[in-house]
Image (cartoon, rainbow, N blue to C red):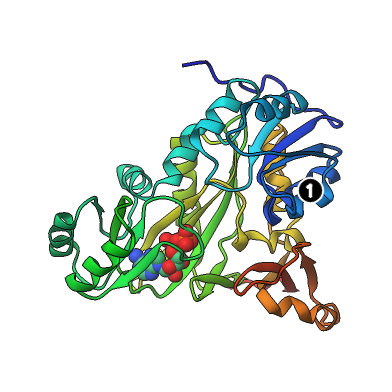
Amino acid sequence: MTAFKTLSAPVAPGGTIGILGGGQLGRMLAMAAARLGLRTHIYSDTEKAPAFQVSAGRSLAAYDDEAALAEFARACDAVTFEFENVPGQTAAFLAGLVPVNPGPRALAISQERYEEKRFVAGLGLKTAPFAAIDSRDDIAKAIKAIGCPAVLKTRRMGYDGKGQATIRNAKEAMEAFDRFQGVPLILEGFVDFAFEASVIAARGLDGSFAAYDPPGNEHENHILRRSTVPCALSESQCADAKGIARAIGEAFGYVGVFTVELFVARDGALLVNEIAPRVHNSGHWTLEACMVSQFEQHMRAVAGWPLGDPARHSNAVMENILGAEAHDWLRLAQNGSALHLYGKGEARPGRKMGHLTRLRPLTKD
Ligand SMILES: Nc1ncnc2c1ncn2[C@@H]1O[C@H](COP(=O)(O)OP(=O)(O)O)[C@@H](O)[C@H]1O
Ligand SMILES: [Mg+2]
């Protein structure tokens, strides 16, 4: 195996950070980098990638095009990514040429739901009960151990609830198994949670750690609708949530921003749902409510800079603008919230087109 490049000195202003992926997260990362005097170079396989609009450097090529990847690596002082489904080989190839953070191991584990749950459980953290499903025979055994209702999920490539089915009995599980056509699956016990929360945290090159206050997250049709800070977690639960993120970050030897999605059980227990090795939709409010946003924090970390202060100076509610709601941009622009539109063309149903953040004075609760 070729050795992975590591960052030996901070990337100075004027240097270039490469970002694999060109969606809204890449776009907001590029804008945050610009504030620090860092340039960005976006690599995407999609011509209309929203991040291309705000980045001077761009590569339009497939994620397995090694010639294009090598050219991209030469143009960058450090590389990161904005989506977790970057092919493992792409990350490993790049990491042999240029410092890539987060590293290929964190990426590999968080891409695969079963590996991810095993990793989290191995750290002594709580999750829903889970089992790997590779064949129809595994289903009966898993249901016996886990019970119903349960959620059957593809181990790879799921997002916004895609690639999952809630099942009430073995028959429904078999039907869902057949629909997923033989891809590796995981069965998880259905968590009757009180609410969902997340921790957006960062680890610096020097091992320093910073976490934002956890937002509470409401989903509609499995898509995030709203994130609110503060959420209903107590002060000690917030500390525990940040502790969970810290344990995960250290175990990965992580550099950059990452997110831990949590289920808050009715008895107050915090269960890890999944890890996103990147900035997160539930952290967009940090752009207005914190001195250093999740996007700037990530750029600081992957450029080897000191982490910024994650303290929140305001309370905030962030709401996504989904699909055709974006057609109402003129009205949305008048409502007194901070408006973000991602520069996407077609407003397909459920597509994340932008978001709004409303600030409130900080309250102690
Ligand atoms: N085991 C579970 N029990 C209850 N709800 C779940 C479970 N797994 C997923 N969900 C619901 O579906 C949403 C999306 O699932 P998640 O595993 O986070 O996948 P992704 O965000 O990658 O689509 C969660 O935020 C939660 O609302
Ligand atoms: Mg999720």
Q: Position of residue 100 (x, y in %)?
A: 61, 30
| Above or below for 314 versus 181 | below
Asked whether mark 1 lies closer than 8 Å to ligand 1, one says no
The residue sitting at 60% across, 34% down in the picture is 101
Figure check: 192 above or below 77: below
In-front residue for pair 127/269: 127
The amino acid type, in three-letter code, at marker 1 is Phe
Q: Is residue 270 left or right of residue 253?
A: left
Q: Nearer the viewer, residue 167 or 214?
A: 167
The quadrant of the picture occupied by the C terminus is bottom right
Name the residue: 59% across, 59% down.
213
In terms of depth relative to the viewer, which is nearer, 50 or 15? 50
Which quadrant of the figure has residue 270? bottom left
Q: Quadrant of residue 263?
A: bottom left
Q: Is residue 237 visible?
A: no
Determine which residue is flagged by label 1.
52
Side of 223 where 341 appears, left or right:
right
Counting the numbered discs, the total is 1
Question: How far across and how far down the image is residue 62, in percent?
Answer: 63, 39
Q: Residues within 10 Å of mark 1 (few under 14, many from 20)?
A: many
Q: Residue most toward the top?
A: 2
- For image coordinates 46% across by 57% down, the residue present is 158
> x%, y% of residue 344?
74, 63
Query: Is residue 215 something that shows in the picture?
Result: yes
**SS at circle 1:** helix
In the rendered image, residue 27, in percent from the top left (x then y), is placed at 75, 52
